[in-house]
Image (spheres, coloured by chain):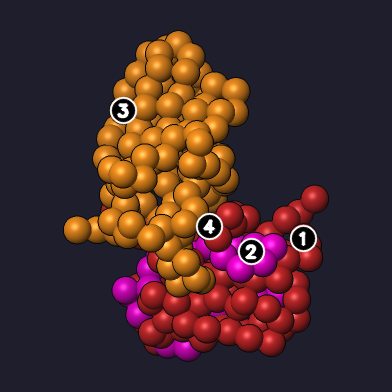
Amino acid sequence: NAGVTQTPKFQVLKTGQSMTLQCAQDMNHNSMYWYRQDPGMGLRLIYYSASEGTTDKGEVPNGYNVSRLNKREFSLRLESAAPSQTSVYFCASSVGRNTGELFFGEGSRLTVL
Amino acid sequence: RKEVEQDPGPFNVPEGATVAFNCTYSNSASQSFFWYRQDCRKEPKLLMSVYSSGNEDGRFTAQLNRASQYISLLIRDSKLSDSATYLCVVNSGGYQKVTFGTGTKLQVIP
């Protein structure tokens, strides 16, 4: 069972470049999320999609956009990468509304030079 | 005061020892609580939910103290494989109200 799959696992960008992180889940979950994790800080919510067709901002949405392509897929786009976006990004999903019970992908390590 | 606070550790304990971590939260209206385990350079994985009456899963016991606003995780008979960072998660209602602690690092030594 794949669960939540993220690609790419690693990426190095130059300042100003764009990229899209892809996420897919095969658990038939309704809600999906993008978090970032930085040293000394808890995971912070970037964007979430409560259900197919809806997306909403989380705690740190600036510099990001998302697309809920269908029930399975939720992508995160950096239009013009900045060094402050160097982080580990995790996609997650939950059956329904976010109670705190989440299933995470393996993470994507992004470095912006 | 941070919404969720954890002692970062590291807690270095010998195999077989019992170790306990606490996690304090600031919002008295918080509704649900969880412990996650995160291995180095891996994703967080749900370890256990924390129920009001306390709950146990093998060597792991989780407790909630609403009066003092903290949750705890007790690990008995520590194994080398328990070495990881333990994250507490507090839900205060709604998608944007799920807060992760920064984690407590546990190192079990032979």
| The label number, if any, that marks residue B11 in the structure image | 3
Q: Position of residue A38 (x, y in %)?
A: 36, 60
- In front of the other: A19 or B52: B52
Q: Tell me the distance, in whole angstroms, between the alpha carbons under discs 2 and 3.
A: 31 Å
Q: Is residue A78 above or below residue A101?
A: below
Residue A93 is a magenta residue: yes
User: The residue tagged with tag 4: helix, strand or loop?
Assistant: loop
Dot 1, crowdedness within 10 Å: few (<14), some or many (≥20)? some
User: What residue is disc 1 on?
Assistant: A27
Asked whether, in this view, residue B43 is left or right of residue A59, the answer is right
Q: Chain of mark 2?
A: A
Tag 4: amino acid: Gly
Q: Are marks 2 and 3 on the same chain?
A: no
User: Disc 2 on helix, strand or loop?
Assistant: strand
Callout 2 touching callout 1 (CB < 8 Å)? yes
B72 vs A7, left or right, is: left
Helix, strand or loop status at disc 3:
strand
Closer to the N terminus: mark 2 or mark 4? Answer: 2
| Quarter of the view holding residue A42 | bottom left
**Residue B100 within the segment the image draws in magenta:** no
- Residue A73, how many percent across, how many down? 71, 75
Image quadrant where one finds the C terminus of chain A: bottom left
Q: Nearer the viewer, residue B5 or A35?
A: B5
Mark 3, mark 4: which one is toward the viewer? 4
User: Cα distance, mark 1 to mark 4?
Assistant: 17 Å
Q: Circle 3 marks a residue in which chain? A: B
At a point 56% along the width and 28% down the height, the residue shown is B56
Q: Which residues, given as a range, are shown in magenta?
A: A73-98
* Distance from Cα at disc 3 to Cα at disc 1: 35 Å
What chain is the orange one? B
